């Protein structure tokens, strides 16, 4: 089990779909259409298949997909939701085993909400494999450290600072890049000769996404407590205020993300 709950992934999927930078999706689709057919995508850290569901109707029709995750329960849910399709292969694989990553013939590796969990060392070893094959990368929805609410609370900054510190702890790949993930990937891929484009892809959560806002807030409690810079009483006050504000008409929340598309010109 990865600790990523299928219900949480289902809750965030519509917000992710809406947030993705459309211009990068268009560039990705054009790149796949111009390459050698049939295009082949490898979605790493696929969860229940959110990236597949979002992109499969947009990329060329003959695109083949490999969806890879190490969590058998999420892969089971992906299989249930996607159904049987000759174009899709599900693979259980731990990304820490990069040598066996099935990159042969892959046009572009895709990932969503993954690279902020990864360390600089993991990215460097992953990019060695990617750039060796001149494979492209579409890394979307990397959290960028921004979290803001229209209705302010005096502890917002301290809580978000603690949350962002926690984002940099080890999430299974060594010390995580957290909010620095996109910039790290951009610099490394440009140094390897790739054409890299990044675009902002924030969640803008309003009154119609109260469940997602509330779940996001509840999910912040444990990481902020673990950092220990905000007292338990203060955190509980903040959380109670934030959860009640979710129901206010004029309440909304921005959670910053960045998308990246890297294509080798050769
Ligand atoms: C935040 S979730 C994103 C899931 C999916 N991409 C989405 O957007 O809904 C991160 C995913 O990375 C997977 N993951 C984390 N560590 C992994 C590892 N070492 N090997 C393979 N998958 C991993 C988790 O199981 C989870 O599905």
Image (spheres, rainbow, N blue to C red):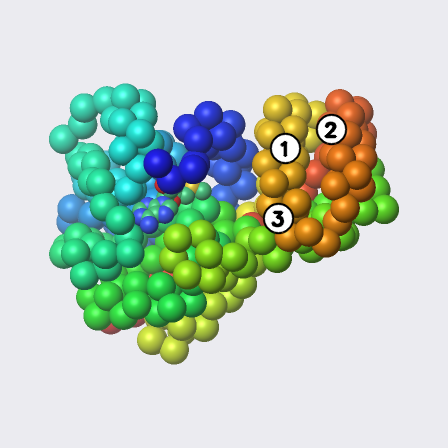
Q: Position of residue 73 (x, y in %)?
A: 31, 29
Q: Which mark is residue 218?
A: 1
Q: Nearer the viewer, residue 210 or 58?
A: 210
Q: Position of residue 47 (x, y in %)?
A: 36, 37
Contact between marks 2 and 1 (CB within 8 A): the answer is: yes
Q: Is residue 16 above or below residue 30?
A: above
Left or right of 147? Residue 265 is left
Q: Which quarter of the figure has residue 134?
A: bottom left
Q: Nearer the viewer, mark 3 or mark 1?
A: 3
Q: Position of residue 117 (x, y in %)?
A: 45, 53
Q: Nearer the viewer, residue 1 or 14?
A: 1
| Res. 195 visible in picture | no
Q: Nearer the viewer, residue 127 or 36?
A: 127
Contact between marks 3 and 1 (CB within 8 A): the answer is: no
Q: Which mark is residue 243?
A: 2
SS under mark 2: helix
Question: Where the C terminus falls, by quadrant?
Answer: bottom left
Left or right of 28? Residue 134 is left
Q: Which mark is residue 226?
A: 3
């Amino acid at each position: 089990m990865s600790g990523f709950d299928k219900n949480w992934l289902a809750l965030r999927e519509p917000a992710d779909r809406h947030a993705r930078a459309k211009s990068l999706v268009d560039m990705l689709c054009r790149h796949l259409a111009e390459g050698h057919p049939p295009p082949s995508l490898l979605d790493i850290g696929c969860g229940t298949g959110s990236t597949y569901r979002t992109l499969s109707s947009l990329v060329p029709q003959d695109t083949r997909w490999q969806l890879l995750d190490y969590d058998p329960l999420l892969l089971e849910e992906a299989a249930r939701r996607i159904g049987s399709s000759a174009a899709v292969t599900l693979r259980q694989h731990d990304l820490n085993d990069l040598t066996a990553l099935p990159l042969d013939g892959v046009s572009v590796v895709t990932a969503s909400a993954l690279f902020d969990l990864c360390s600089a060392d993991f990215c460097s070893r992953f990019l060695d494999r990617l750039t060796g094959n001149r494979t492209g990368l579409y890394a979307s929805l990397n959290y960028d450290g921004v979290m803001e609410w229209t209705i302010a609370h005096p502890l917002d900054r301290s809580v978000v600072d603690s949350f962002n510190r926690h984002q940099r702890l080890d999430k299974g790949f060594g010390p995580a890049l957290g909010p620095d993930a996109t910039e790290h990937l951009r610099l490394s891929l440009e140094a390897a000769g790739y054409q890299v484009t990044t675009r902002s892809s924030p969640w803008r959560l309003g009154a119609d996404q109260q469940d997602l806002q509330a779940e996001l807030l509840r999910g912040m409690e444990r990481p902020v407590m673990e950092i220990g810079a905000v007292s338990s009483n203060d955190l509980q006050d903040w959380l109670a205020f934030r959860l009640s504000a979710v129901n206010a008409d004029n309440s909304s929340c921005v959670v910053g993300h960045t998308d990246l598309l890297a294509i080798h010109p050769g």
